[in-house]
Amino acid sequence: MITVDNLTKRFGAKTAVDHLGFEVRPGVVTGFLGPNGSGKSTTMRCMLGLDRPETGSTLFDGTPYHRLARPLHEVGALLDAGYVHPGRSGRNHLRWLAASNGIGRARVDEVLEMVGLASVAGARLRSYSLGMRQRLGLAGVLLGDPRTVILDEPANGLDPEGIRWIRDVLAHLAGQGRTVLVSSHQLSEIALIATDLVVIGQGRLIEQSTVADFVERFGERWVRVKGPALAALAAGVQQQGGEVQQIDATTWHVHGVECSTVGEIAAASAVVLHELSPQTGSLEDAFLKATAATQEYRSAELGAPQ
Amino acid sequence: MINLLRSEWIKLHTVTMNWVLGIIAVGFPLLVTLLTANFGGDDIDFRTESLVEVLTGTTLVCALLCGVIAAASITSEFGFGTIRPTFAASPKRMRVLLAKGVVAMATVVVLAAAVQLIGWFAGSAIAEGRGADIDLADVPTAVPAMVGAVVLVALMALAGYGLGLMMRSTPVAVSILIVWPLIGEGLIGALLGQIADSDSIPRWMPFQAGFRLAFVGLQDDGPSRVVAGCYFGVVALVLAAIGAWATNRRDA
């Protein structure tokens, strides 16, 4: 269990993290989401004591990070796969990390095998691709077999096989009852692996909930209706305060009315339906809606092609 | 603490640049000393003092390079970002910084001691082989100068480490470490000496005082070897302490 309480971090006049508090429960993967510049990485650094927060604290199973005797056995963190000396080999990078917590060389070889880097363990890190460095970073996380795992954008630079692999690893770790917190911009990935979400914007908590509840709350919902002649349905839907959107000749999307109500209107109007199904928007849609007010960097509208 | 020392030793010896600097730091004084022992001066006139002077004098280069090794041991951590996994793996920062400093200083002491021992024994053997009369008893300040040279290397490493902690940048820390003792102190010392109308002021500039640890003859009115060593030691210790204090307080 991770407990973040009232965390505040300022860089000069800018408040990067603003009285942030949330909890991460064990046994599930928790996605940590926020727009660029929302304070995710700063929060993670503060949680690990790397950045000194102005206020607040973080507890890992009730213990502050700096009080952990052998932190790698309690918390495995990958903040940036680029935090390596390019002149060192992958094995030597893990060796110094392991030695700092009294972990033996055998475990280094074991985790190198686990992440698929055993064959290049002796190569200098300057020759590693970003994906290989991500794998090395994850090997560092696994070194101490920790109860808590914190990863910042772990899928960056990974190929499709690597992305699937990291998804399986995270699910496996959570399945073993560990606490797993993962930040990512790849919302489709988070939707696949996360059960819980912590969403922040401008350093403040926007929402903490399950993914399902988050999408339910912020995502768009509508009813898809298919049938050979739907025209008679429109008046009934509008009477109930809903709106219809014609997708094609046989498909409508009905907004603002429950699925059951649409079915009752169809029955009352003797309209033949081939499909009547409730639809929910994606995590991406819900995220964009939830964080719309806190987007720090916005793209300009693209003009029509000439 | 043993774990941290082991971890820092792995970091230090697994970077090629440190090996290159270490080999130059050992090789340069040895090469110059042994060549001088073989070719320097008239065979009869080449004496113990000549051998020790060239050995301890060229150790100043060793000291500067060892300072660079110590400075880079911490600045490279900031430069490549490895300071973050380091402090994440060992959140008690002062212990990490202490371990890193101890490893750097212990390593350079071994290098400097090797230079003095190999330089003396090989150099005297070569010089005696061509007829020179070499005997440590001839020069009472020879052993103190050679021991002082080892201490100087250790203190230069400590000063370099402190500068590295404060600057967090290899080019800046190394520039200060090289330019300040070789040029900066000379200029400022001379200027202050002119103002105060005193010849001894330049000898009290911190690094110049430190260099006196390795001088064979100290007949001027500057600080004695012990006083100079203590003075430079305090300066180096203060640099390292300020750097460690700042690193402990600042974001990693």
Image: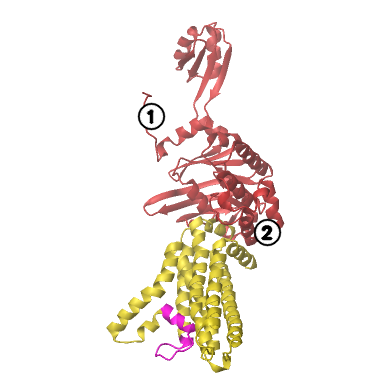
Instruction: From the viewer's perspective, tell me whether residue A115 is left or right of residue A229.
Output: right
Front residue of this view, candidates A293 and B6? B6
Residue at which label 1 appears: A302
- Mark 1 residue type: Leu
* Chain letter matching colour yellow: B
Using a 10 Å C-alpha cutoff, classify the residue at mark 2 as few (fewer than 14 neighbours), some (14 to 19) or many (20 or more). Answer: many
Q: Is residue B220 magenta?
A: yes
Residue B44, image x, y percentages: 53, 91
Is residue A134 at least partly visible in the picture?
yes
- Give the label on residue A267, or none: none
Q: How many numbered circles does the render carry?
A: 2
User: What amino acid is found at the position of numbered circle 2 in the picture?
Assistant: Ile
State the residue position of label 2. A103
Q: Which residue is at 43% across, 91% downward?
A: B219
Q: Which residues are magenta?
A: B206-227
Let me know if residue A218 appears in the view: no
Instruction: Specify whether residue A177 is painted magenta.
Output: no
**Label 2 marks which chain's residue?**
A
Which color mode does the image show? by chain
Q: What percent of the width, then of the height, locates residue B29?
A: 53, 76
The chain to which mark 1 is attached is A
Residue B190, image x and y in percent? 32, 80
The chain in red: A
Q: Secondary structure at mark 1?
A: loop
Residue sitting at x 58%, y 87%: B130
Q: For marks 2 and 1, give the CA distance.
A: 53 Å
Q: Is residue B140 left or right of residue A297?
A: right
**Rendered residue at 56%/45% (across/down):** A129
